[in-house]
């Protein structure tokens, strides 16, 4: 009985230490920006794109990514959704690029282009939502970037 209680106490202590080790009070959320979007050759009905994301790690600890999932929306229409695994480590106070393959939502694309033709505007809004998986006991990191794209051709 004593041996079982001791084992449970040791396991609980180890889990508590691991939980505390994952908490970083000065941790800053990494920055994720879209660097490039390129069409890929595809024989499917839904076109595929390569999305290159630039990730900046403002922390001293390396960012070991096990996976990433992202969605790119234009004017509220989720047009591209993609994932990637087996990603490079982004060093502390470092940056790097991550490439993933994304698929277009055909119906969202049709709705977006119909809306664009009906309501001609000089700007459209975009939103990137990304989920970074650092693996292990560390919680997922969710980041988003919002902005506008100027369609008028003026700088």
Image (cartoon, helix red, strand yellow):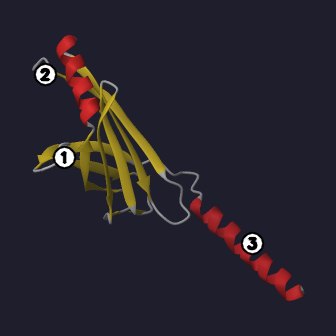
SS of the residue under disc 3: helix
Q: Position of residue 82 (x, y in %)?
A: 30, 49
Residue 121 visible to the viewer? no
Q: Position of residue 45 (x, y in %)?
A: 17, 43
Q: Which numbered disc flags the more N-terminal residue, 1 or 2?
A: 1
Above/below status of 25 relative to 16: above
Residue at x 13%, y 22% (from the top left corner): 155
Label 1 or label 3, whichever lies nearer to me, is 1
Residue at x 90%, y 86% (from the top left corner): 1
Q: Residues within 10 Å of mark 3 (few under 14, many from 20)?
A: few
Q: Which sits in the foreground, 36 or 58?
A: 36
Q: Which numbered disc flags the more N-terminal residue, 2 or 3?
A: 3
Q: Position of residue 31 (x, y in %)?
A: 37, 45
Residue at x 37%, y 54% (from the top left corner): 68
Q: Is residue 153 left or right of residue 37?
A: left
Determine which of the numbered discs, if any, sits on residue 19 in the image.
Answer: none
Q: Which numbered disc flags the more N-terminal residue, 1 or 3?
A: 3
Inter-mark Cα distance, 1 to 2: 26 Å
SS of the residue under disc 2: loop
Q: Residues within 10 Å of mark 2 (few under 14, many from 20)?
A: few
Q: Residues within 10 Å of mark 1 (few under 14, many from 20)?
A: many
Q: Position of residue 137 (x, y in %)?
A: 56, 64
Above/below status of 82 relative to 67: above
Total marks drawn? 3
Inter-mark Cα distance, 2 to 3: 59 Å
Pointer 2 residue = 155
Residue 116 visible to the viewer? yes
Pointer 1 residue = 49
Q: Is residue 38 left or right of residue 96?
A: left
Pointer 3 residue = 12
Residue at x 49%, y 53% (from the top left corner): 140
Say whether marks 1 and 2 touch (CB < 8 Å): no
């Amino acid at each position: 009985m004593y041996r079982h209680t001791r084992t449970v106490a040791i396991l609980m202590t180890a889990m508590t230490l691991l939980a505390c080790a994952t908490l970083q009070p000065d941790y800053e959320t990494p920055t994720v920006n879209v660097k490039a979007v390129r069409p890929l050759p595809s024989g499917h009905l839904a076109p595929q794109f390569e999305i290159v994301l630039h990730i900046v790690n403002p922390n001293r600890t390396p960012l070991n990514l096990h996976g990433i999932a992202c969605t790119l929306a234009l004017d509220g229409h989720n047009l591209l959704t993609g994932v990637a695994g087996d990603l490079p480590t982004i060093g502390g106070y470092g940056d790097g690029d991550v490439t993933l393959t994304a698929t277009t939502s055909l119906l969202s694309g049709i709705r977006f282009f119909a809306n664009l033709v009906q309501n001609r505007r000089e700007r459209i809004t975009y939103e990137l939502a990304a989920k970074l998986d650092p693996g292990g006991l560390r919680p997922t990191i969710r980041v988003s970037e919002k902005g506008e794209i100027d369609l008028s051709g003026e700088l």
